[in-house]
Amino acid sequence: MILSFVIPSYNEEPSLRRLYEQIVASVEPTGHTCEIIFIDDGSTDHTLQVLEALHQEDQRVKVIQFRRNFGKAAALMAGFAQAQGEVVFTMDADLQDDPVEIPRFLEKLDEDYDLVSGWKYPRLDPISKTAPSKLANFAIRFASGLELHDFNCGYKAMRADVAKELKLYGELHRYVPVLAHWRGFRVTEIKVKHHPRQFGKSKYGLARLSRGLFDFITVVFLIRYTRRPLHFFGWMGLISLGAGLLIDGYLSILWIMGQAIGQRPLLTLGTLLIIVGAQFFSLGLMAEMLSYSILSREDEYTIRKKLD
């Protein structure tokens, strides 16, 4: 069996050779062959030179260089497109993920799972990273119904068909297990060793936290309303339209009874709510037409097995 390792790298020069050696040492006892795909995501240090040297020494090492920093999601998609293995691993290049866990991932996949996600336990990161992560993991579990402890762990193993079906952009790499689960793949997790960062500095920051929040909202919408957007916008439109009609209906009764309503702010509010409600309905219908024009050309299902 061929194993493909997809490893995004951004200014990870000091750790790359050691990571390569650890992967090779962990794979060889399994009897499998492997390819190691490094994606240089616009590094400004000597990451590319290290990767080129590794490629010259071992043809199993493949290198993709981006013209600039496009982000982890883009790097993963580029790696998935080139991966030839039956099982695809993703891991970070900073040596916090331990390649010694590779056989355990393969054993879990053999239990008829399609994707195995790592659970960094115990996690050796500062509280500035662990506290928001715990809150995010709770929210994702609640919204997706997928019972995992660590959705954002970059250490994963998946069957090739999972990697080929994923469509990642922005910060959606954080939600790979959710997107795979939504597509009907069997997802689980295992506890993995987590090492403190030895080289470089973390790419985590407040900007990534805010982007992750927006992408969480995107994922919730994708898994629940991609194929029925009117159900999302329609409810908001129905609430707004209903409230507006109730207000204006109440004012109409007062007008019939002889009271002046032309200068009442409540009239403006009721009319505004009716207009906003109608706009939500219009937005939902346009989203439905857009979804139909795009999704009608795609399969709404994934096939696990077929016997001819």
Image: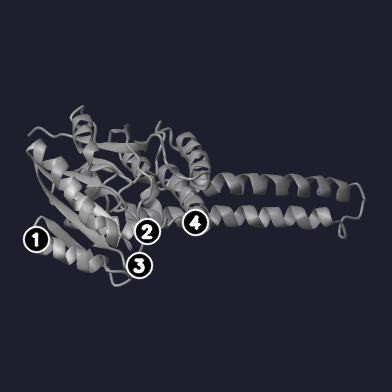
The residue under label 1 is 57
**What is the C-alpha distance between the residues marked 1 and 4?**
36 Å
Q: Nearer the viewer, mark 2 or mark 3?
A: 2
**What is the C-alpha distance between the residues marked 1 and 2?**
25 Å
Percent position of residue 291, x then y: 39, 54
The residue under label 4 is 205
Q: How many residues crowd mark 1 within 10 Å: few (<14), some (14–19), many (20+)?
A: few
Q: How many residues crowd mark 2 within 10 Å: few (<14), some (14–19), many (20+)?
A: few
Residue 207 horizontal side relative to residue 35, left or right = right
**What is the C-alpha distance between the residues marked 2 and 3?**
16 Å
The amino acid type, in three-letter code, at marker 3 is Asn
* The N terminus, quarter of image: top left
- Indicate the secondary structure of the residue bearing disc 3: loop
The residue under label 3 is 69
Q: Give the color scheme: rainbow, by chain, secondary structure or one colour.
A: one colour
Q: How many residues crowd mark 4 within 10 Å: few (<14), some (14–19), many (20+)?
A: few
Q: Earlier along the polypeptide chain: callout 1 or callout 2?
A: 1
Do the numbered discs 2 and 3 sit on residues whose CB atoms are within 8 Å?
A: no
The residue under label 2 is 200
Q: Earlier along the polypeptide chain: callout 1 or callout 4?
A: 1
- Indicate the secondary structure of the residue bearing disc 2: loop
